[in-house]
Image (cartoon, rainbow, N blue to C red):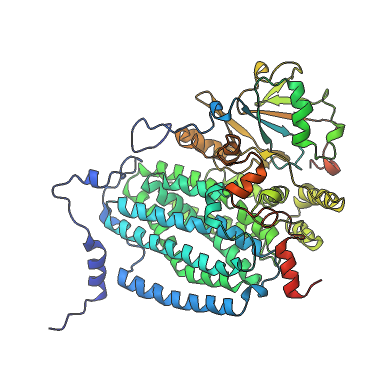
Amino acid sequence: MAAKKLNIKDKYRLLTRDLDWEFSYEDPKQAFPYEEFEGIKITDWSKWEDPFRLTMDSYWKYQAEKEKKLYAIFDAFSQNNGHLNVTDSRYVNAVKLFLTGVSPLEYQAYQGFAHVGRQFSGVGARVACQMQSLDELRHVQTQIHAMSHYNKFFDGFQEFSHMHDRVWYLSVPRSFFCDARSAGPFEFMIAIGFSFEYVLTNLLFVPFMSGAAHNGDMATVTFGFSAQSDEARHMTLGLEVIKFLLEQHEDNVPIVQKWIDKWFWRGTRLLTIVAMMMDYMLPNKVMSWKEAWEVYFEEAGGALFKDLARYGIRMPKYAETIEKEKEHISHQAWWTFYTHGHAAGFHTWIPSDEELDWLSAQYPDTFDKYYRPMWELAKEQEAKGERFYTSGLPQLCQTCQIPMLFTEMDNPNQNSMRDYLYQGERYHFCSDGCCDIFKEEPEKYVQSWLPVHQIFQGNCGGPGVGEVLSDYYRMNVGVDNMDIKGSPDEVRWNKWKGVA
Amino acid sequence: MPVYALNPGYQGERMDRVENFHGNQIVYLGWDEHRMFCAAKAFPLPPSMPFAALIENIMPEAFGQHPEFKQINWDSAEWLLDGEPFKPQADVSLADQGVGHKSLIRFKTPELTGYQGAGV
C-alpha cells in the first residue's frame, strides 16, 4: 500500500503540537520546575501561536541548501585569496572583535535556547526554542568557518574561545549572556528573544554586515546573508513571546516591563563595542553610530513601543539618557581601547586626519569639544616616541563589567560613577541603569567575576600584567596587541600590497 | 527581593571580599575632569598605608603620564571619599581615616583644566 502523503497542516500538527503528551501519573510541576518561580502566570498555553511554521524535516532541507551555497562561497573566497580584497589591515581588527566577542555569544544563545526549549510546559514554545537553538549552533559554526581564512594570514584569531572566557573586555559580552542564561526561562526569552533579537539585533548585525560589504569582506557578508532568514524567524519568536506573556495575565505586565528596562539597558551597554567599531574601526564607514541608533532604535523601536502601549508597556527606563549618550560612547570606547592597546587582543590606532574630520562632521555637537583634543594629545605623544599606553588597571562596573568610562550627560568631562552598600560591602556602577539592576538582585551580582579584581586576587597568573596577557589570556604579546603601526599584520599587508 | 531563584534563600558567593586580596584592600583613584585616563584606576593597597605614601608612590604610578601631573598642587586639591567631601591626613593610615575596601577617592585640581583646557 502506498503511503498516504500528509497535507502540510496535518504534517505540521503531527511534528509539533502532537509531540506533547498529558502527564497522567507525574506532577507536571516536577516535570517543568522552572515555570513558576519568576512570578509569570500562564493560564492557557494553547493560545501560543507558533512563530516559525516549520517542521523539522523541512527545516533540515532548507538549512542544508543554504549551507551548500555558503560553503561554496567560502571555498571560492579562500582559493582567490579573498583577504587581499579588504580595504586594509585595520579592517581585519573588526573581524577579530566579532570572532572573540560575538560568535561565542551565538554558542551561548544555542545553550540558552536549548535549556528553555526543555523547560516550558507549552509544546509550541518548546519546539520554537529548540529550532532557534539549532540556528544559533549553525551560526557559531558558519562564523568560525568564515573567519578561519583570516586566521591563516592575520594575528589574534587563534584563541578566540579561550579568550572569550578570560580576557578583561570579553567579560562584558560573556557576562551579559551568563546573566540571561542563569535567569528563569521567561526572563531569558525577554532578554534574548525580545530585547536582543528583536529590538537591538539590527544594531549588531546590520553594522557588521554592511561594514563587511563596504570593506570588501565577502566571507562575512555571506554568512550574514545566510543567517538573515534565521534572524527573521528569531525576531518573530521574540515578538510572539512578549505578546503571549502580556495577553496571558495582567500580573505579567510589571514583570515584563522590569525585564525590558533591565535588558534594554544591558543591551545598549553591550552595543558600545559596535558603536566603536562603526565609528573607528572600519576604514570605509557605513554610517555613524549616532545615525544607526536613530534609524534602528529611535525610529523602529519607537514604533514598536507605541504598539506595545496598549498592553501597558512604556519605553524602557533611561531611554532619554541613551539618546544623549549616542553622541559620546563610540569615542569613549575607542579611547579606552587605544589607551589599553597593550592589553587588547587586536590592534588600535589614532584615526587619520580625514577620519577626524568625518567624526567632526558626524558629531558636530560633541566631537571637537570633547574628543578631538584627546587625539591631538595622542598624536603629540606619538610624535615624541611615547605612544600612550595607560598604566594600571581600570575600575569596572559591577553589573556590565565595562571600565567606568561613561560620563555624565550634564557634564561630559566627568566620569559617571554610582555606588551602593550591600550588607556592608561597597559596589560600583557606571550608571543609574546598572545600579538599579544590582539593587533588584544583589545576590546575583555580588558574584560578578570582575577581571581586574581577579587579577589582584592572583587568580589569573602573573605576577605582572605581561604574564596575565601571555599565559592566562594566551595572547601573543607584541604580535596580537599594541598599535597597528609596525605590527606584523601591517608589515605583511604592506608586503602583499607592494607598499614600501 | 535579593534574588529571583529557584531555591528559597539562595545566596551568591561574594567574589571580592577583602579577605581574598592577601592583606590588601582595593582602593580606586580618580582624577576628575582628566579624561586622558578613561576611568578611575584600581589598586590593591595595605590598609595601613599612610596617605602621604599614597600621594608619593601611588599617584605618580596612576596619573604620572599626564602632562599636567607635575603641576599638581596637592595642598589645593579638593577631595571626595566615597562621594563625601574629605580632608586627607598625610600621616594617618588609609584605614584610620575611613578609606575602606573598594573605597573611591576622587580629587579635583581647580587650577588644572586638562590638556587644551578640555578636561582631557
Task: Name the spot of residue A169 as percent of width and height, x first.
Answer: 60, 48
Task: Name the spot of residue A35 as percent of width and height, x first.
Answer: 31, 45
Residue at point 56% right, 67% down? A147
Q: Is residue A440 left or right of residue B99?
A: left
How many numbered tags mark residues here?
0
Task: Name the spot of residue A500 as percent of width and height, x first.
Answer: 82, 71
Residue at point 57% right, 72% down? A219
Residue at point 25% right, 67% down? A15
Query: Considering depth in this image, is A404 or A290 the residue closer to the camera?
Result: A404
Residue at point 40% right, 72% down? A63
Residue A317 visible in the displayed image = yes
Task: Name the spot of residue A323 as percent of width and height, x first.
Answer: 62, 49
User: Where does the N terminus of chain A fall, quadrant-wise?
Assistant: bottom left
Q: Is residue A228 above or below residue A119?
A: below
Q: Is residue A162 left or right of residue A285?
A: left
Q: Quadrant of residue A345?
A: bottom right
Residue A203 visible in the displayed image = no
Q: Is residue A95 above or below residue B57?
A: below
Query: Considering depth in this image, is A395 or A308 the residue closer to the camera?
Result: A395
